[in-house]
Amino acid sequence: LDGWAGEVEWVAADVFDPSAWREHLRECSAVVHSIGIIGETPAEGVTFERVNGDSAILSALEAERAGVERFVFVSSSNTPPLVRDAYIEAKRRAERSIEGLDLGTVVLRPGPVYGPDQPHFPRAVNAALRTMDRVPGLGRLLSEDRPLPVSRVAEAVYAAAVGDADAAFLDAPAIAAMTRE
């Protein structure tokens, strides 16, 4: 990894087993939560409530307990097409639950995020979103639901994590304004 991403300690663990990752929070200055799903498999315990909501709340509580300075939550501007409203309800519940914690919290609410290897969209959808993002004026018309490249959202997440974001809440226009591809 190059640039700022090379300075990040990447840890893979089961978010619902804090004992597997809690020790990594000791020297940590920021935690970024970007876990989410757009499809559920309730029989396996994979629900919007659990993955999009509970995992964020659990992560933020653990970060607060460890004395982490900043928690960045990648939420969403809206429910994606053909997805149940429970998707966004879980995200908003998590936002409300973490806002009063004793750590600096920044919530990002991007619209659709596109880019290479985007697991949620086929190539044609990624191409359409990229085109929509680049049409002059369309971004202002779509406002908070404007598509953004994953690289731009990643830059905004990094800025939020290191304290360069002035707001506790960043919607798509704010994310687009603070970064440039």
Image: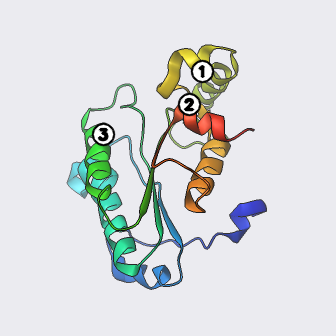
The residue under the point 67% across, 21% down is 131
Question: Mark 2: few, some, or many residues within 10 Å (few <14, many ≥20)?
Answer: many
The local secondary structure at tag 2 comes to helix
Looking at the rendered image, the disc whose residue lies closer to the viewer, 3 or 1, is 1
Identified at 42% across, 34% down, the residue is: 77
- Determine whether the residue tagged by mark 3 lies in a helix, strand or loop: helix
| Circle 1/circle 2 CB separation < 8 Å | yes
Residue at the location (60% across, 62% down)? 162
Q: Residue furthest right?
A: 2
Residue under label 3, please give it.
87
In front: mark 1 or mark 2? 2
In this rendering, position of residue 143 left or right of residue 128: left
Residue 55 pos. (x, y %): 33, 60
Which callout, 3 or 2, points at the residue further toward the start of the chain? 3
What is the three-letter code of the residue carrying label 2?
Answer: Pro
The earlier-in-sequence mark between 3 and 1 is: 3
Q: Using the numbered discs, state the Cα–Cα distance from disc 3 to disc 2 in whole angstroms.
A: 22 Å
In this image, 111 relative to 86: left or right? right
Residue at x-position 62% and y-position 19%:
132
Q: Which mark is residue 173?
A: 2
